[in-house]
Image (cartoon, helix red, strand yellow):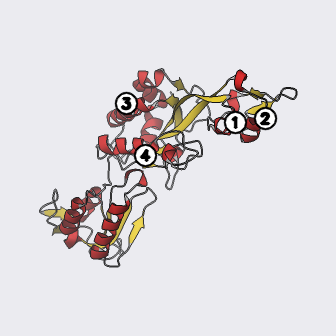
């Protein structure tokens, strides 16, 4: 079937680009972050922006480069927080990459590999943030970006249960949580924590006003901790809920939660071992959600072993879309 909107899909051209010298198939360019547009000879150049964060100085310089090489002088912010320079002629690839390198900006990549991570603001400036999502995104970009996998592999980091980074839709997602702990001596029975809790996990005693806490109702958001005027509610521990096997698209799948309160220091290990399992068990061109359905979630959990063992694992898999063996 011919796509009449995309020309030169099979032509091989001299691009003179570092790492792509010689004749290159236009389809191969997408893996390097150069995405063919409908218009003949024009591409979107996708830039690496882990966590969607750029310095103002770099943003100004990128704007100058985009104004120079974009035929229409426009950029696009993708749904995964990448900045794309649109309407770039392939003959300018070498020049635009050289100018981007001068300001320390790298081109992203597509294809079967670990993609640029996405993240919310986290605890750096967001009042709801519980974990340093931006630090985690930088870590993934530095350690794992571009690692070959059977299909695309997307990660994201949300700093709280609001889950702005949509960890339920990712191949591997991490959502920040905090476990609250109540200390009676500091409590005055003001009932503010009951009012702050949106999940009805806290009910005030009718006589004393002191909280009755139902841990099963808690989403670990920390609202009670932030609202408490006396410090009676404290953070027992922080960590991440880990979810695996999600995806959006034509046939979306909700990721399966596999661990609670995974600490920051174990996140790199969790990612590394997940990639290892994925590469060992998935077929070529198979998303990890499909591999999990075919091989079984139990295989993955067994492989992860001690990575999740010391934390609080999810034991009720009955409602998950990814059925364990």
Name the residue carrying label 2: 191
Secondary structure under tag 3 reads: helix
Indicate which disc, 1 or 2, sits on the residue closer to the N terminus: 2
Front position among marks 4 and 3: 4
Q: CA distance from mark 1 to mark 4?
A: 29 Å
User: Is residue 24 shown to the viewer in this render?
Assistant: yes
Indicate which disc, 4 or 3, sits on the residue closer to the N terminus: 4
Name the residue carrying label 3: 269
Corner quadrant of residue 32: bottom left
The answer to whether 303 appears left or right of 228 in the picture is left
Q: CA distance from mark 4 to mark 3?
A: 18 Å
Figure quadrant of the N terminus? bottom left
Residue at 42% across, 55% down: 52
Q: CA distance from mark 4 to mark 2?
A: 34 Å
Label number found at residue 221:
none
The answer to whether 146 appears left or right of 209 in the picture is left
Indicate which disc, 1 or 3, sits on the residue closer to the N terminus: 1
The answer to whether 189 appears left or right of 41 in the picture is right
Q: Position of residue 51 (x, y in %)?
A: 42, 50
The answer to whether 286 appears left or right of 168 in the picture is left
Label 2 crowding class (10 Å Cα cut-off): few <14, some 14-19, many 20+? some
Q: Position of residue 85 (x, y in %)?
A: 34, 68
Front position among marks 1 and 3: 1
Q: Residue extending furthest right?
A: 207
Name the residue carrying label 1: 229
Residue at 11% across, 63% down: 22
């Amino acid at each position: 079937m011919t796509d009449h909107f995309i020309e030169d899909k099979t032509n091989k051209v001299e691009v003179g680009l570092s790492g792509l010298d010689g004749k290159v198939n236009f389809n191969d360019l997408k893996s390097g972050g150069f995405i063919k547009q409908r218009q003949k000879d024009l591409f979107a150049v996708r830039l690496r922006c882990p966590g969607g964060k750029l310095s103002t100085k770099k943003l100004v310089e990128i704007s100058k480069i985009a104004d120079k090489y974009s035929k229409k002088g426009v950029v696009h912010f993708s749904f995964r927080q990448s900045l794309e320079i649109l309407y770039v002629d392939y003959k300018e690839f070498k020049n635009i990459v050289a100018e981007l390198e001068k300001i320390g900006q790298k081109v992203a990549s597509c294809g079967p590999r670990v993609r640029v991570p996405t993240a919310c603001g986290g605890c750096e400036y967001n009042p709801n943030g519980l974990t340093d999502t931006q630090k985690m995104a930088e870590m993934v970009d530095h350690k794992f970006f571009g690692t070959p996998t059977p299909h695309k592999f997307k990660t994201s980091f949300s700093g709280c249960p609001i889950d702005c980074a949509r960890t339920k839709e990712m191949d591997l997602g991490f959502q920040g949580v905090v476990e609250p702990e109540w200390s009676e001596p500091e409590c005055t029975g003001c009932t503010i924590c009951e009012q702050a809790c949106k999940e009805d996990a806290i009910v005030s005693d009718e006589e004393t006003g002191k909280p009755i806490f139902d841990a099963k109702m808690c989403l670990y958001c920390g609202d009670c901790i932030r609202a408490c005027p006396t410090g009676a509610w404290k953070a027992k521990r922080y960590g991440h809920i880990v979810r695996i096997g999600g995806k959006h698209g034509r046939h979306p799948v909700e990721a399966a939660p596999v661990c609670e309160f995974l600490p920051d220091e174990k996140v790199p290990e969790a990612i590394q071992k997940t990639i290892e399992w994925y590469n060992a068990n998935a077929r070529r061109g198979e998303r990890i959600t499909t591999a999990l359905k075919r091989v079984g979630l139990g295989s993955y959990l067994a492989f992860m072993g001690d990575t999740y063992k010391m934390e609080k694992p999810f034991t009720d898999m009955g409602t998950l879309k990814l059925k364990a063996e």
